[in-house]
Image (cartoon, rainbow, N blue to C red):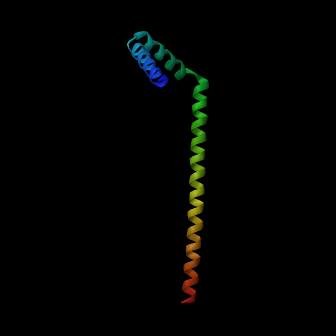
């Protein structure tokens, strides 16, 4: 019952806000501030670098595993060829 009342309240609030041009000006102001904020820009840059670094590390780990598996396969094939 409380969840339904909260949902109705939220829906009413959203209808009121989205029908008010001042709300859009307010949101535009926030977005403009965030876009022009050097600290936020630096945060995004660092986060992007971290994600790229993690992706490179994952790629290296996968490549090393594949290389090891291929080495084991080649050694196994060479042993079988010597026996035959």
Residue drawn at point x = 43 percent, y = 9 percent = 22
Residue drawn at point x = 46 percent, y = 24 percent = 1
The image quarter in which residue 50 lies: top right
Q: Residue furthest front?
A: 1
Placement of 78 over or under 72, stated as above or below: below
- Residue 78 is left or right of residue 3, and the answer is right
Give the image location of residue 49, x and y in percent: 59, 39
- Residue 82 is left or right of residue 4, and the answer is right
The image quarter in which residue 8 lies: top left
Give the image location of residue 74, x and y in percent: 56, 75
Give the image location of residue 32, x and y in percent: 50, 18
Q: Nearer the viewer, residue 16 or 56?
A: 16
- Residue 9 is left or right of residue 46, and the answer is left
Residue drawn at point x = 54 percent, y = 85 percent = 81
Q: Residue furthest left?
A: 19
The image quarter in which residue 41 lies: top right
- Residue 52 is left or right of residue 4, and the answer is right
Q: How many marks?
A: 0
Residue drawn at point x = 57 percent, y = 59 percent = 63
Give the image location of residue 9, x and y in percent: 45, 17
């Amino acid at each position: 019952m409380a969840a339904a009342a909260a949902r109705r309240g939220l829906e009413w609030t959203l209808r009121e806000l989205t029908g008010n041009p001042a709300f859009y000006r307010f949101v535009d102001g926030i977005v403009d501030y965030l876009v022009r904020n050097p600290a936020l820009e630096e945060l995004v840059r660092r986060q992007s670098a971290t994600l790229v670094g993690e992706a490179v590390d994952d790629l290296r780990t996968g490549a090393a595993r594949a290389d090891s598996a291929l080495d084991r396969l080649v050694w196994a094939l060479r042993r079988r060829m010597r026996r035959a």
